[in-house]
Amino acid sequence: MWQVFSDGEGSGDVDGGVDAESTRRIAEAWMRAVTSCDVDAALALSSPSIVYTNGGHLRLYEGHDGLRDIIEDLARLSGFLDVAVLSAVAEPGIVALKRLETYTLPEGGVEIPALSFVEVEGGVVTRWEDYKDLRTLNTISE
């Protein structure tokens, strides 16, 4: 059964446990490390065989080298991109993270709703599937 968490709830340790709360804490710590471009922390919380897909938008990243590529892409957007985790729903081994990506452009801010499914096994993230609502970008480009 899925457990719903809001920011700051829970008191479990990030110890690799298999309960929903530990899974959520690992996934959230990992997402913070990735989006803040903290390569060392992100790699420490990632399986060497981690796989990233982005909802059929043509990208697949694998392993620590793939994760480094993602973080390099995010670092290029530093100062233009803010990522906030709005809520989390977890069960042992998998977390759904509802996110909001805000891009600051000369024309103003653009908000892109996103959803990540993060799988955790043995205390590390093994898979990240990311889905973004690109309707906002499509309207800007028209």
Image (cartoon, rainbow, N blue to C red):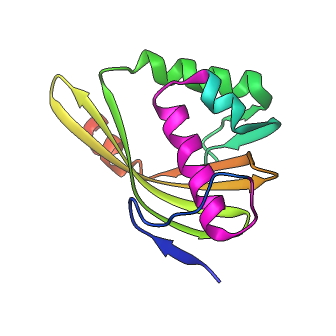
Q: Where does the image place residue 110, in percent across and percent down from the top left?
A: 25, 39
Q: Where does the image place residue 58, in percent across and percent down from the top left?
A: 65, 38
Residue at screen point 65% across, 84% down: 1
Instruction: Using residue 14 as the reference point, say whether residue 47 is left or right of it.
Output: right
Residue 86 versus residue 142 in the image, above or below: below
Magenta stretch, main secondary structure, is helix
Q: Nearest the camera: 112 or 140? A: 112
Instruction: Using residue 9 as the reference point, say whether residue 91 is left or right of it.
Output: right
Residue 30 versus residue 92 in the image, above or below: above
Residue at screen point 55% across, 33% down: 34
Residue 132 versus residue 91 in the image, above or below: above
Q: Which residues are magenta?
A: 16-39
Residue at screen point 64% across, 51% down: 14
Count numbered badges in the picture: 0
Location of the C terminus by quadrant is top left
Magenta residue check for 35: yes
Magenta residue check for 44: no
